[in-house]
Amino acid sequence: MLEKFDVSITNASKGMALMLILWHHLFYEEPESGWFVFQTALLAKVCVGIYVILSGYGLAESIKKRGMELRAFYKRRLLKLYMNYWLIALLFVPFGAWFMGRTLFSVYGEHSFEGFMIQMLGLQMFTWVGYGYNATWWFMSLIVVLYAIFPLMHFLTARFGWWFLAVCAFILFMPIPLVNDWIFPFAVGIFLSQRNGFVWLFNWFQNKGLWGFFMLLGATVFMAWYRQNGWLFDSVRADTFFGILLILWTTKVSLFFSWIKYALEFIGIHSFNIFLFHTFIYYYYFPDFIYGFYSPLLIFLVLLGVCLMISMLIERFKSLIGFDKLI
């Protein structure tokens, strides 16, 4: 039985989501890699929904301890978000400009300074900049908005519960740029924190014994199929439900196999760093090296290993300069 969906399980779930994002990015445009690899790469886009759910959950958990003082909340959360983002940009953008031919001018044209500043504020997806220097950084535009509206969403979720979730589900079908697909999973993450939902769901399946295992397996297989072939709540609209099921599987595996939990947790601790820079490694700078290993599994493992090593070096550098004291 699960007593608490704690930080270690959250980090393990982030580790699982990071591996999904690497698999997705490596192969979702590579049908020649084989039917199974290609289809699982398409399904792996659920990683965004998982990150959004866990972001809502984590923010809601944090204010249980710290309280909701708006100025302190925005200062702490946005400063930490931006400082890590800017550090990665400081390390990788000059390298790309000086050694890989990816200059600011080649990306933004004659408005290089304005374009780069907009991207560093995380506002690029709402402007002419678009994906800009690194396509994966589109997520920064989303997470900045979600952080900004979190206090209001936390209040509304606590006050109106299921009714507010229904409104957020309706927003999935509204033409709101960028955020319409992600307000619902963010609200669900907040709701699950407020109602201890992950613990309740996990223990409900556990209490059913072997039937619970097959019910969870059947629900996961169905959601995987429905995400690709269903209607209305299909595709990314289904990722809230699919993502929760994958988080429950990660929790189950983590509780039964401690070594898997430690491995996923270690990856999860590095997940934000790797999210920010992995596209430079496999796509912009060294695609021939990464894809040169031919076997999809080996390509994936090489990228994961390289990214973990780089992230560990970054964390060591941050420790040496006292980076955490700045935030």
Image: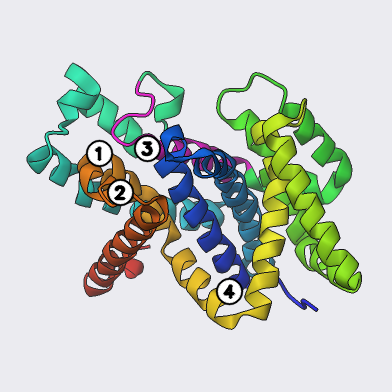
Residue drawn at the location 64% of the way across and 35% of the way down = 236
The three-letter code of the residue at mark 4 reads Ser
- Whether residue 170 appears in this view of the structure is yes
Do the residues bearing badges 1 and 2 touch, measured as CB atoms within 8 Å? no
Is 242 left or right of 269, judged from the image as shown?
A: right
Question: What's the residue type where badge 1 is placed?
Answer: Tyr
Of residue 119 and residue 234, the one placed in the foreground of this image is 234
> What is the magenta segment's predominant secondary structure?
helix
Q: CA distance from mark 1 to mark 3?
A: 22 Å
Q: Which mark is residue 121?
A: 3
> Quick one: label 1, few (<14), some, or many (20+) residues within 10 Å?
some
Helix, strand or loop under label 4 = helix
Q: Amino acid at mark 3?
A: Leu
CA–CA distance in space, label 3 to label 2: 9 Å
Mark positioned earlier in the residue sequence (1 or 3):
3
Residue 8 is marked as: 4
For the view shown, which residue lies furthest in the left direction? 98
Q: On the rendered structure, is 87 left or right of 200? A: left
- Location of the N terminus by quadrant is bottom right
How far apart marks 2 and 4 lie (CA) works out to: 26 Å
Q: In this rendering, does residue 187 appear at all?
A: no
Task: Identify which residue is drawn at 49% across, 64% down.
Answer: 268
- Dividing the picture into quadrants, the one containing residue 256 is bottom right
Residue 86, disc:
2
Residue beneath disc 1: 284
- Of the numbered discs 1 and 4, the one sitting upstream in the chain is 4
Task: Give percent across and percent down for residue 37.
Answer: 50, 44
How far apart are labels 4 and 3 at the CA level? 30 Å
Disc with the residue nearer the chain's start (3 vs 2): 2
Q: Nearer the viewer, residue 236 or 111?
A: 236
**Mark 1 and mark 4 residues within 8 Å of each other at the beta carbon:** no
Whole-Å distance between the Cαs marked 1 and 2?
18 Å
